[in-house]
Amino acid sequence: MNTSKFLQSITVAVSSALILSACSDSVQSTAGEDFNSGGGNNGGTTTFNETALLSNLTNNVITPAYLNFETLANQLHLAVDQYCSVETSFNNGSATAAERDNELAAAQQSWHNSMEQWQKIEVMQLGPLIENQSLLRNQIYSWPVTSTCAVDQDVVYFNQGSINGEPYNIANRVATRRGLDALEYLLFNENLEHSCSSTTAPDGWDNLTSAERRQQRCEFATEVASDIGQSSQILLNAWDGANGYAASLLNAANEPGSDFANAHEAVNRVSDAMFYIDSVTKDGKLGVPLGLFENDCQQSLCPQDLESQFAYQSLEHIRNNLISLKSLFTGEVNNSEDTTGFDDYLIEEGATMTANNMRTAIDAAIADVEAYQQNLSLTLQNNDAQVRETHRKVKAITDQLKTDFINQLALELPATSAGDND
């Protein structure tokens, strides 16, 4: 995907390549009453137990999400490896096409499972996922910075075993050549031609048979899946290890082992992560393809700027973003009796109407996405009014997030939203 215009259209805190300029379309956003003052609900000026909020969200919402992804990432590696083994067997005549196709379908389903969980984590980007200009996050999933040509090139480099005279090592490759987005291309793209220009074409690809191309792609897919599994373990260690970021959140009340001066500061970092729904889900995943901002189609409807170009899961990604936002806002997840969330904080601060309005808006947006009868690409082309309505419903959430929510809890806007008039 050509993302150069896309990157000019949205501000995404999760990726260093996207820290550009924010978009706007209507609502005036302001910081909380004590924005950048160090005051507000800080140092005991609120009766709400912010430590309890941090405890529930860390232990029962975020940490289980990271743990689940690590499990699913390892399963993904096994499924892709099994598919490639059968692809090899098919090529040498010891497996049927049906057996090969069944294993491919199983690998694709495992990708779906992993991506579903990752899209929830996208709204939980804290600590290790935003450190070093979001390096780890981008290694696992770099969208919207993607390049199918880069993946095509690395298929060949990997199968050759070297690049520029050095042994191939995926750990040394840039994010656009690895991760869940690269794996989507490898597993779901049925076109065996490369996607590069004549000057950047992978060496020798045009001389390969279809069977050889499938074989080389599946072998690189196995390497990519293995790399995702390793990155998921690095994430888990950085989050849940003895000195991990989770411990810092849990010890945020001026205790040793914390990166925060107080619990309110830590709460603000969790709030920052929730603004992914504004700058990425609303603006990037909906606004850009709708032509509300500059895109690859001169601000016309632009299906090629949708997130999932090969598995057609763009709607599911948006839905999982919203489900994750709801779990952070309400503190409600399966298998946990603790439901301390931001809604409880708002109610304690006398903002019951805001709490109710935001819950209602989140539920309405989820229901809207679940009502689609076609994937987002087809709907955008056949009924863009429905997609505009989805954008409106997500905006109903983010308008409140950037005004009543931060004002009533005396939170600071994240850098991507400070000064943004959207």
Image (spheres, rainbow, N blue to C red):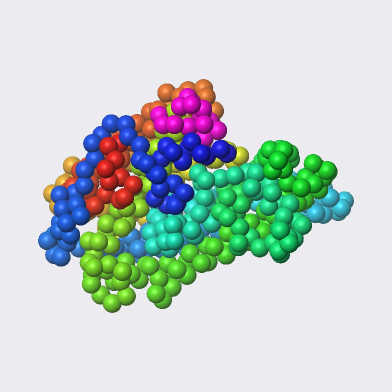
Q: Is residue 241 left or right of residue 205?
A: left
Choose between 232 and 96: the one closer to the eye: 232
- Which quadrant of the rendered structure holds the C terminus? top left
Q: Is residue 212 left or right of residue 253?
A: right
Please name the residue shown 40% across and 71% down the image. Answer: 244
Magenta: main secondary structure equals loop
Q: Is residue 298 magenta?
A: yes
| Residue 315, x across and y down, in percent | 48, 38
The range drawn in magenta is 292-305
Q: How many marks?
A: 0
Choose between 259 and 84: the one closer to the eye: 259
Q: Is residue 179 visible?
A: no
Choose between 12 and 349: the one closer to the eye: 12
| Residue 393, x across and y down, in percent | 34, 34
Q: Is residue 172 left or right of residue 126?
A: right
Please name the residue shown 51% across and 67% down the image. Answer: 234
Please name the residue shown 71% across and 58% down the image. Answer: 163
The answer to which image quadrant residue 171 occupies is bottom right
| Residue 181, x across and y down, in percent | 57, 48
Choose between 188 and 319: the one closer to the eye: 188
Q: Is residue 263 magenta?
A: no
